[in-house]
Image: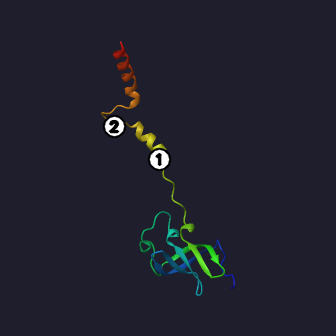
């Protein structure tokens, strides 16, 4: 098999078929590969048809070429910039704890009162 394409190469292809598990993309007249559903976009994809249609031109990266079978594994996701990571959950929790709801005292505020009450009961 003549090496037209290389692993890691980014090029434009055309969606030729859609299945529940992925989309087939033609790279040229003779070669097509599969974009697995997990490689369509960043994040979870429940229904690939919501993201791709037959005839769409897409930018893909060749992830792997199986020389024996001639199968190409492709990724659309690898050609896109990853979305910014959400703020650290720990930072969000600290921010939320600093804003105590009206009518409720924090543990820190009540601790001194409880210590005083305990001492008063002992005397």
The span from disc 2 to disc 1 (Cα, nearest Å) is 19 Å
Q: Secondary structure at mark 2?
A: loop
Q: Is residue 71 above or below residue 100?
A: below
Residue at 55% over, 62% down: 81
Q: Residues within 10 Å of mark 2 (few under 14, many from 20)?
A: few
Most extreme residue toward the front, as rendered? Answer: 122
**Residue denoted by label 2:** 101
In this rendering, would 116 be left or right of 54?
A: left
Res 26 quadrant in image = bottom right
Q: Are marks 2 and 1 in contact (CB under 8 Å)?
A: no
Pick the quarter of the image with the C terminus: top left
Q: Determine whether the residue tagged by mark 1 lies in a helix, strand or loop.
A: helix
Where 99 falls versus 117 (above or below)?
below
> Residue shown at 38%/27% (left/top)?
109
Does label 2 or label 1 sit earlier along the sequence? Answer: 1
Answer with the quarter of the image where residue 11 lies. bottom right
Query: Which residue is rendered at x = 39% and y = 37% of the image?
Result: 99
Image-based side of 119 in relation to 4, left or right: left
Which is nearer the eye, 98 or 73?
73
How many numbered discs? 2
């Amino acid at each position: 098999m003549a090496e037209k394409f290389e692993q890691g190469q980014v090029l434009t292809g055309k969606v030729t078929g859609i299945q529940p598990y992925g989309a087939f993309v033609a790279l040229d007249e003779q070669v097509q590969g599969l974009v697995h559903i997990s490689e369509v976009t960043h994040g979870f994809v429940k229904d690939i048809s919501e993201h791709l249609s037959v005839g769409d031109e897409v930018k893909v990266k060749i992830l792997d070429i199986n020389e024996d079978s001639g199968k190409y594994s492709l990724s659309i996701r690898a050609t896109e910039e990853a979305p910014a990571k959400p703020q650290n959950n720990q930072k969000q929790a600290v921010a939320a704890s600093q804003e105590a709801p009206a009518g409720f005292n924090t543990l820190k505020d009540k601790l001194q009162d409880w210590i005083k009450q305990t001492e008063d009961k002992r005397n």
